[in-house]
Amino acid sequence: MDRVLKALGAAHEGSVGVLLADGTEPGPVYFDVGSGPHVPSSTEWHAYDGRYSRPLAAVLRGRCSCGWRGAAEYPLDWTTLPDDKPLYEMDVDLSGPIADYEAHRSVIRDGAVPLPTELTELLTELVRRLDGLAVEEPLVTLKALADLRYVIART
């Protein structure tokens, strides 16, 4: 992953999303694993297979954690998909939604403002030195971060 996208981190994590037949994007699917305080859930595309009273996906599309949703829709033809297998085991072509997300990510990367090389080097050195200080002198690290916070607020 290039430096710009790595810096954006979780703000632009892509996946394959689904829409139901009525055009709505479903919420998470919850899995009944018996009694207990934790009920696992998922928003992965393959969880929407209609089994065990789960919603049934009608179309696939690209999606991003930033809120972006692909305009292109890739219908799932349930007449050709076997009923006895989970959706993730079926031969479903995900190339369209993935390509749409990759195009979105390219737009984000191309639109990001690059930092001057000198500033990138300075920030890299600062992180390296703070990492070393965190082990050797944690209070000095906290003081440096507090000072940095002041500089950020002032700037």
Image (spheres, rainbow, N blue to C red):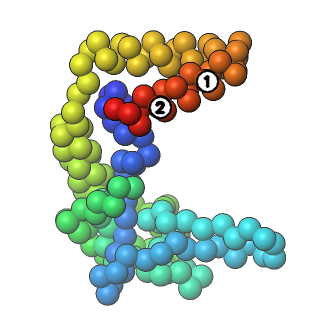
| Residue underneath mark 1 | 143
Residue lying furthest right in this view? Answer: 35
Q: Look at 24% across and 62% down and name the residue there.
A: 70
| Residue underneath mark 2 | 150
CA–CA distance in space, label 2 to label 1: 11 Å
Q: Look at 32% across and 28% down and name the residue there.
A: 2
Whole-percent x, y for residue 90 in the image: 44, 63
Whole-percent x, y for residue 41 in the image: 60, 68
Quadrant of the rendered structure where residue 52 is? bottom right
Residue 50 vs residue 78, the one in the foreground: 50
Is residue 145 depicted above or below 66 in this figure? above
Q: Which quarter of the image is occupied by the N terminus?
A: top left
| Three-letter code for the amino acid on which mark 2 is drawn | Tyr
Q: Which quarter of the image is occupied by the C terminus?
A: top left
In this picture, residue 79 sits left or right of residue 132: left
User: Please, what secondary structure does the residue beneath circle 1 have?
Assistant: helix
Q: For mark 1, does the 10 Å Cα neighbourhood hold few (<14), some (14 to 19), or many (20 or more) residues?
A: few
Q: Look at 23% across and 69% down and name the residue there.
A: 73
User: Please, what secondary structure does the residue beneath circle 2 have?
Assistant: helix
Is residue 103 among the parts visible in the rendering?
yes
| Three-letter code for the amino acid on which mark 1 is drawn | Lys
Quadrant of the rendered structure where residue 61 is? bottom left
In this picture, residue 6 sits left or right of residue 36: left
Is residue 80 among the parts visible in the rendering?
no
Cβ–Cβ below 8 Å for labels 2 and 1? no
Residue 67: assigned label: none
Residue 4 vs residue 43, the one in the foreground: 4
Residue lying furthest front in this view? Answer: 154
Q: Look at 31% across and 73% down and name the residue there.
A: 59
